[in-house]
Image (spheres, grey):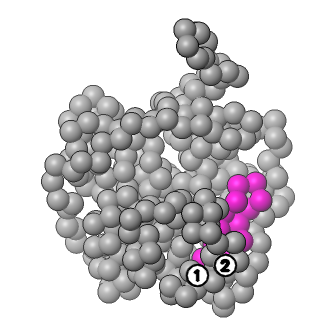
């Protein structure tokens, strides 16, 4: 196993529609996709698609949605380390005009403790804050072993502040800045203070404000995908995280700007496809995005 991911799994049903019916209305969607979902989960699949051997500690139920998820993981050679729950979690995703509405039903009442794994050979750990006990346990263990730790800070969770004390690469969303009443610059200063070697704040089409190994702050603009080609922005950030983990695993000595360049190209590919599975790029897809679009 090259990279370990910890998160909460969903089955995502993504529907492309111009309108959302209300009351007794009915409507027919233009297209739909059924896929795996969840922040670190989607990142794990994205990483695996690009080559590294990915392991995933995640929720899994003994129902037909759980069977579907396990089949998806086997297809992409994502090694599952399940934490049992009674029911699978489900998301309905409605992308429209560069945004997406999400309705979720989640079971996070664990029926068992999280698995303890041998970390031999693991080069990177990626977390999204879900399964807070497991996240903190493995962040501490990886820090002790010198394994790179990465956090998707999509929003404030119960363990976010404590977890940041063990994180090397923290890429957080603008939403977390709002929740903590920070500007982007203040968030970067906070991440530095918490000891994160690399920190960034993502802001959709505006790219990412981040600091590198030397502490220098700069803007990494997103690739300019024409608006008419943007189909589904849901999962773009998760693919971004999975792609930079894959880039790091394979070329750990490269500057982080190079890893993030790969990640933004992967994200540019994702937003042109409906659903998470269709939006997972190959290496060739990433190279095509880098050649086709400018920042």
| Residue 246 can be seen in this image | no
| Residue 18 can be seen in this image | yes
Residue underneath mark 2 = 186
Mark 1 residue crowding within 10 angstroms, few (<14) / some (14–19) / many (20+): some
Q: Are marks 2 and 1 in contact (CB under 8 Å)?
A: yes
Along the line of sight, the residue nearer the viewer: 285 or 118: 118
Along the line of sight, the residue nearer the viewer: 233 or 119: 233
- Pinpoint residue 41: horizontal percent, then vertical percent: 42, 51
- Helix, strand or loop under label 2: helix
Residue at the (28%, 73%) spot, across then down: 137
Above or below, 152 against 100 in this view is below
Furthest-left residue in this view: 112
The answer to which quarter of the image holds residue 18 is top right
Residue at the (33%, 64%) spot, across then down: 132
Q: What residue range appears in magenta?
A: 199-210
The answer to which quarter of the image holds residue 291 is bottom right
Q: CA distance from mark 2 to mark 1?
A: 6 Å
- Pinpoint residue 2: horizontal percent, then vertical percent: 39, 68
Residue at the (41%, 46%) spot, across then down: 76
Residue underneath mark 1 = 190
Along the line of sight, the residue nearer the viewer: 1 or 143: 143
- Pinpoint residue 141: horizontal percent, then vertical percent: 29, 79
The answer to which quarter of the image holds residue 191 is bottom right
Q: Is residue 92 magenta?
A: no
Residue at the (30%, 37%) spot, across then down: 88
Furthest-bottom residue in this view: 214
Q: Is residue 200 magenta?
A: yes
Mark 2 residue crowding within 10 angstroms, few (<14) / some (14–19) / many (20+): few
């Amino acid at each position: 196993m090259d990279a370990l991911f910890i998160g909460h799994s969903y089955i995502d049903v993504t529907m492309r529609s111009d309108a959302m019916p209300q009351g007794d209305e009915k409507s027919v969607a233009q297209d739909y996709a059924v896929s795996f979902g969840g922040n670190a989960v989607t990142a794990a699949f994205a990483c695996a698609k690009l080559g590294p051997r990915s392991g995933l500690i995640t929720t899994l139920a003994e129902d037909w949605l759980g069977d579907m998820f396990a089949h998806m993981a086997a297809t992409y050679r994502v090694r599952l380390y399940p934490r049992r729950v009674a029911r699978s979690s489900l998301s309905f995703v409605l992308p429209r005009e560069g945004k997406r509405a999400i309705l979720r039903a989640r079971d996070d009442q664990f029926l068992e403790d999280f698995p303890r794994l041998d970390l031999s050979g693991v080069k990177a750990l990626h977390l999204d804050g879900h399964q807070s006990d497991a996240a903190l346990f493995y962040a501490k263990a990886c820090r002790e072993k010198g394994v790179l730790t990465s956090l998707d800070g999509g929003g404030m969770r119960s363990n976010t502040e404590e977890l940041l004390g063990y994180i090397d690469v923290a890429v957080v969303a603008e939403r977390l800045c709002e929740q903590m009443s920070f500007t982007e610059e203040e968030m970067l200063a906070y991440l530095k203070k918490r000891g994160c070697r690399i920190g960034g704040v993502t802001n959709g089409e505006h790219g990412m404000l981040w600091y590198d190994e030397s502490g220098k702050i700069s803007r990494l603009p997103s690739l300019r995908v024409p608006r008419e080609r943007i189909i589904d922005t849901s999962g773009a950030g998760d693919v971004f995280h999975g792609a930079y983990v894959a880039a790091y695993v394979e070329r750990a000595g490269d500057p982080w700007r190079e890893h993030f360049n790969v990640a933004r190209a992967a994200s540019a590919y994702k937003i042109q496809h409906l659903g998470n599975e269709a939006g997972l790029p190959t290496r060739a897809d990433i190279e095509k995005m880098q050649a086709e679009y400018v920042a």
